[in-house]
Image (cartoon, rainbow, N blue to C red):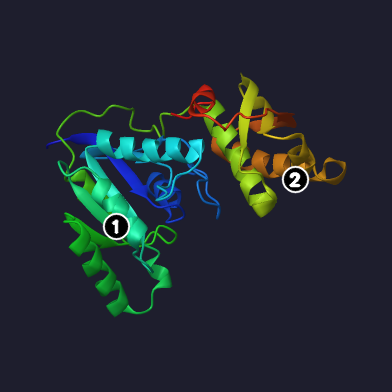
Amino acid sequence: MTFRCGYVAIVGRPNVGKSTLLNRLVGQKLSITSDRPQTTRHRIVGVVTRPQAQLLFLDSPGYQAHAGSAMNRVLNRTALQAAQEADVVVMLADARAWGAADEQLARLLPADRPLLLALNKIDAVRDRGRLMALAERARHCRAFDEVVPISARTGRQVELLLELCAARLPEGPARYESDALTDRSERFLAAELIREKLFRLLGDELPYACTVEIERFEELPRLRRIHAAILVDRESHRPIVLGAGGARIKRIASAARVDLEKLLGAKVYLELFVKVKSGWASSEQSLRAYGYE
């Protein structure tokens, strides 16, 4: 039997469900999710191994049509680079709307490799005629190899999307062990899960220029000791994260610890504190120092 292996980039606008789809495909929470735009800031590989194929799914930041800040410019470049480096590209769009920003991104995607359109959130669309009209509008913008309505939240037709991607991968041996889930380290995943809790628990109060830096990660047989700094851009942002009497940062640590223990399969000792790092997100050079490429 022919075995296939290669990269599949998942690209789309912010909040269309790219990270939810990656987590559904892999069967594990690797990529963080929230309602805020640009929650995903790094490229993450999710590994899915089937008897006849190994698919290396690349989650990417949401592409923003108007990228004014240094961070948005870097994230847009990361998203398009993922598409350029992949063997197959899946453009994910919201099944409830197709707009100018979707058209802009579709035209930027490479023309020399398979391109599939996945219309996500079909569980929220009752009018099938409206869904068909949206798919037709998308096809007028770009010639997609396939248009697949899916629901990343419920899993509907996600396996079909996976099979369509696998059939278009190049022939070749697997690059990872069959039980591998990602190329990222536990240290990286810990920082991301903590950042997710920041986004979810602080909501609109959270300063955009905020990230997490793991300062110490100690791995023991059944325990992980993690010391992490939450980086904010201004001194006035510190009390927002800490909360009255440190209540908020305790909630963030508690929520992150629960997910980390599930992911790592070990007890987790997690200590969080806040650091002010003025201007860390204001230039592309400083962003690269914190792993943004």
The residue depicted at 63 percent of the width and 51 percent of the height is 200
**In the figure, residue 100 lies in which quadrant?**
bottom left
**Res 3 visible:** yes
Q: Quadrant of residue 280?
A: top right
Q: Can you tell which quarter of the image residue 241 is in?
A: top right
In the displayed structure image, the side of residue 109 where residue 209 appears, left or right: right
Question: Is mark 2 in CB contact (under 8 Å) with mark 1?
Answer: no
Instruction: Tell me the SS state at disc 1.
Output: helix
Residue 42: percent from left, percent from top: 46, 35
Q: Where does label 1 land, which residue? A: 103
Extreme-front residue of the structure: 68
Badge 2 crowding class, 10 Å Cα cut-off, few under 14, some 14 to 19, many 20 or more, is: some
Q: Residue at x 17, y 30 (%)?
A: 172
Q: Which mark is residue 251?
A: 2
Amino acid at circle 1: Glu
Amino acid, disc 2 = Arg
| Viewer-proximal residue among 230 and 224 | 230
| Residue visible at 32% across and 27% down in the picture | 176
Tally of numbered tags: 2
